[in-house]
Image (spheres, rainbow, N blue to C red):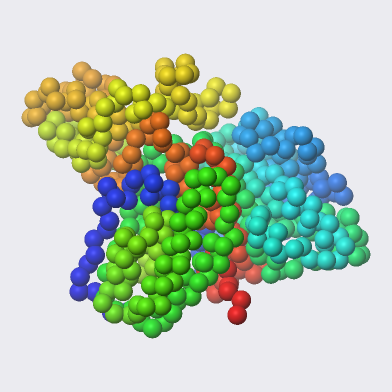
Amino acid sequence: MTDSRSHIARRDPATVMRLSRLGSLHQCRLSFMRQLTRRMANEGWTFSRPVFNIDDAGVGHAVYSAHGPERAYSLVAFAHDLPPEQRSDRVIAEAWDATFTLFDGVPTNEDIDRLSQNVPLQEAGRVSESELSLSRANRSVRLWAHVVDRLATGQQPDLEQIYKVGYLMRTTAVYGSGKFGAADREKTGNRPETNAPFQTEMLSVYLTRTFVRDLVQHMAQVKGGDATAKLDADIARWLGIGNSTGLGMAPFIVNHPILFNNWIMVREEAISRVRSIETASAEEDRAFREIFERSKLSMSWWHSEHPVQIKKLAALNADLSSISTYLSQEKLQHDYPWDRLVRWSETALSQEGQELVASLILEPYGDLVDGLSSCMADSNSGAHVINGAMPVTEVRSLFDQSFGWAMDLDWTAPENCARAWYVSEEKLEPRLGERFKEPIAEYEQPLAPARDAVRAQKALAEWDGEALIAEFLLRHPEHRHAVRRAQMATVAPYGEIHDNTISADVLPIDMLRAKLSFFGATHFDPRSDRWVRICMYSGAPYPEDLIRENADLWVYPEVQK
């Protein structure tokens, strides 16, 4: 690789921050799961299972510890005998097949006793600052039974069924950052291994996957005795952890504009750096083509029954064929090859295909882009402080910059304000209701930044441009949150969604997809426009197999030759 003579700028937020594009993002080198596995392998983390106390009914507890250079973290897992009628992915469920917490250190017997009285209760219990996350999971009933039955009779499970489902258990929530008494982000945010976003949650899920593998083997052994087969390592590798995620996650990217900006801006900077490469080596060309072929295999396992996703998958499959044709006709070693590929994709492919290309071109360039992961956390607390000395005219300009697209919308038209976000009394979770059909308007949450920006801009129109914004806010405190967001744009150009989050046709699933893609999720399977199932860590090495050579590209299945 040679240095570029011309730097290709990051893409415009007006292009990137549309919901339809955010809802087409794919995992990449910067995804949080891959950051974690790379770090653990590079630092030589070791793993142990000090406790596995599960009875023949599949009830009990286990401890899985991960030992890093300075500290240890332990997953404390509780297995339950759940009657089928109580199994539900709804957040309002009160019982699960398994419940978990990630403990800061290695727990004592006293810790485990305390946790056994609280973790299985989830929201109804309480944990302490020694716990970093709280989670629960349910079995994928048919695949679980299939694997147990096959192993118990000395056979391996059917690999096609593994590919089709992808996981033996799926989490229905992984809570962190202070929920239910768990440690706040401030406790771990300055640790190298947990500074990047969601690293404690990703570690919890990684260890959960190992527990699930061990539990299904245990239950097969109970059933089959000496005739039981050991689950083949190559088959086990494709068992990830599923996740069912609904509306509770959707407002996150609206409520955290600085943090979400950092994720998007880092990805855009990585794409910009690779596009700016003038000449690629033969090895970098080969690496990209290999990863593309492997990604095609992964996409072939991706199915959905939701009409919106069926349409997107059809477009993506057509895109894969188009990319294959392009690669058969183009060399990727000269004349800014990656920029040419991206520019071609912008007119030849759907947004799904465009964003897949944008993610894949990063793969040969770990040395160039991986270091950007250190910029993805939100450490800029000062950005949340309103600058009262800013002149009104400057604030108006900021509103136009981030929300100019919204200024001409008729915000009194029912289709433009049809929805309202509120928090349910029962579970204290975000919900999206119909403004004109339900009595929810007085409970509305500030999750319509575009509408609120337009309101603030109209109020500012009557003010002297030289006046200080502090004077305006003393008279109109109802616009404080809108002014704060406008000022954040000076350091967070990718912090605002360039779409109406309360329109009649808004798809919350796009918000979920955007966040989950940064986790590193694959196989997005929407069950409605409000909740989705995904897979995590499918293909990843288990702790006993994790080394530098397999710590990163595990997300792409190997093509059998």
Quadrant hosting residue 384: top left
The percent coordinates of residue 244 (x first, y second) are 59, 43
How many discs appear? 0
Quadrant hosting residue 9: bottom left
Nearer-the-camera pick, 33 or 560 = 560
The percent coordinates of residue 140 (x first, y second) are 71, 48
Residue at screen point 69% across, 60% down: 162
Q: Is residue 105 above or below residue 485?
A: below
Q: Is residue 509 above or below residue 468?
A: below
The percent coordinates of residue 397 (x first, y second) are 16, 37
Horizontal relation, residue 386 to residue 540: left or right: left
Nearer-the-camera pick, 272 or 102 = 272
Nearer-the-camera pick, 222 or 63 = 222
Horizontal relation, residue 278 to residue 441: left or right: left
Residue at screen point 31% across, 47% down: 494
The percent coordinates of residue 536 (x first, y second) are 58, 55
Residue at screen point 27% across, 47% down: 14
Residue at screen point 72% across, 38% down: 87
Kindly give the residue lying farthest to the right in the view shown: 226
The quarter of the image holding the N terminus is bottom left
Q: Is residue 173 above or below residue 283?
A: above
Specify whether residue 439 is in view. Answer: yes
Nearer-the-camera pick, 74 or 429 = 429
The quarter of the image holding the C terminus is bottom right
Specify whether residue 359 is in view. Answer: no
